Image: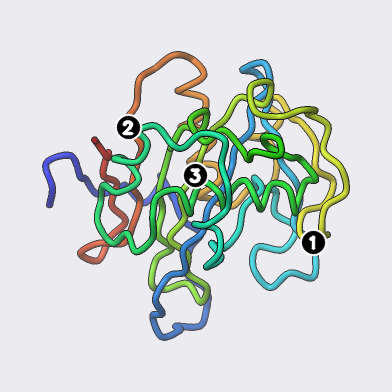
Amino acid sequence: MAENEFKLNADEKPFDPPGADKPKATRPRDAATLILVRGRREVMMGQRAKGHVFMPDKWVFPGGRVDPGDARLPAACELTAGAEALLRAGGLVRRPPRAFALAAVRETREEAGLVLGDDQGPDLSKLQFVARAITPPYRPRRFDARFFLADAEAVLAHDEPAAGDEELLHTRWFSLDEAEALDLPSITRFVLKEVRLRLEGQPVDPPFLRWSRGAHTLERLRS
């Protein structure tokens, strides 16, 4: 076990528990999520539709799978060197770091109708990498997700969400306390606590959550 890696207690529950079925473990798909913060007091979230197989009715941040073309999308500015290094930390990285950031930007546009940047593309240097999580092998749908954080006032032309592609419903701003009271997936609740720490000025390294040696483990990534 790495020096900065430790097992999580059962009551910390960073992932939803296993269901009745025991699916064959599959390779996790790369995914990316963007957490937009307004005034250091509010976060934007939306509710997944009832008919979704994956996390129906749950409140989440905009995000989804990384597409093959995401790495080639234009950007006005690239990720900082520090963010790139953190995205490469932890191993098992099969794509350029910018692919994850641009996927998060694209999903935010598709799901919430919010555009980051202008004709030159988004300013990726304003995105902070805050967490990585790989869904445990006991879940039927697995993702290797990277979570980014950005100040809405610094990256958006306007901060009122519009109708997206029906992946995410009722998208709006919530105070941190309101967000924590929503019906959240376990991993979303965990990451939201990490966001609160950052907004309170506490320096924390990005957590890397995964299933290792038969237990949930957390490693703090360092560049």
How packed mark 2 is, by other alpha carbons closer than 10 Å (few <14, some 14-19, many 20 or more), is few
Q: In which quarter of the view is residue 70 placed?
A: bottom right
Residue 14 has which mark?
Answer: none
Q: Residue at x 62, y 52 (%)?
A: 63
Q: Residue at x 52, y 79 (%)?
A: 20
Q: Is residue 105 above or below residue 51?
A: above
Q: Position of residue 139 (x, y in %)?
A: 47, 72
**N-terminal label among 1 and 2:** 1
Q: Residue at x 52, y 68 (%)?
A: 68
Which residue is disc 3 drawn over?
A: 147
Q: Are marks 1 and 2 in contact (CB under 8 Å)?
A: no
Which residue is disc 2 drawn over?
A: 82
Which residue is disc 1 drawn over?
A: 49
- Residue at the far right in the pictured view: 163
Q: Position of residue 57 (x, y in %)?
A: 75, 58
| Disc 2, SS | helix
Q: Nearer the viewer, mark 3 or mark 2?
A: 2
Nearer to me, 198 or 66:
66
Q: Residue at x 80, y 28 (%)?
A: 158
* 47 left or right, relative to 191: right
**N-terminal label among 3 and 2:** 2
Q: Are marks 3 and 1 in contact (CB under 8 Å)?
A: no
